[in-house]
Amino acid sequence: MKNGDVVALHNKHHIRIVRLTNGCVDAKGGCCEKEELPLYWVSEQFVAVKPDRSAFPAESLFSFYSISHRRFIRVDSENKAVLAGPEKRLSNRIDIEEVFDVVEIKKTFDGSVIALRSPLTATYMRMTGACIDMQGIVPSSWEFLQVKMLQPADEGSSVDSVEAVVVDSK
């Protein structure tokens, strides 16, 4: 996964995909048994964004931006909940609540199996049925997410060029 890739976060055990709606992050959009995400499932598509390296130097850190809702996935540090952040431009400063360490569990022929860890709360995102939350231990294998590549970033593309495409498509 690299800066600007458009991805979906799929769980093979629950046969669901992480989605962001205006106020929340969940997996209630329905089961997705097919290998490909239906194009009209726009709430399940995220731009993988590398945060500013001066503020977040680790190579494995990413944020996930919903193109259709113009919000980042974020962690509520008090409740250890996963929420939709406030509406903002993709090129705006990324807050620590919106940063995840992408821990690669294994590579497969159709993507990477990952765990998402919040450096802020030292907790991991997990999917239990249609719910998404954070917990302090590495998730069980049935709670892992798989990155589904929907649209690779063009060579030499930047967040600004991705945002230009997003704005043009609205």
Image (spheres, rainbow, N blue to C red):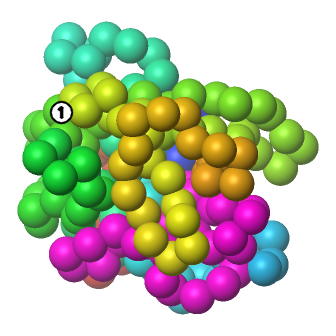
Task: Report x, y in % for residue 30.
Answer: 58, 88
| Residue at position x 54%, y 34% in the image | 138
| Quarter occupied by residue 35 | bottom right
Q: Is residue 70 visible?
A: yes
Observer-nearest residue: 3 or 96? 96
* Residue at the farthest right position: 109
Residue carrying label 1: 96
Q: Is residue 148 visible?
A: no
| Quarter occupied by residue 16 | bottom right
Task: Report x, y in % for residue 92.
Answer: 12, 44
Magenta range is: 7-32
| Residue at position x 75%, y 63% in the image | 12
| Quarter occupied by residue 168 | bottom left
Observer-nearest residue: 104 or 132? 132
Count of numbered circles in the view: 1
Quarter of the picture containing the N terminus is top right
Quarter of the picture containing the C terminus is bottom left
Relative horizontal placement of residue 158, taking residue 150 as reference (left or right): left
| Residue at position x 45%, y 16% in the image | 59
Q: Residues within 10 Å of mark 1 (few under 14, many from 20)?
A: some
Task: Report x, y in % for residue 73.
Answer: 30, 55
Q: Does residue 37 belong to the magenta stretch?
A: no
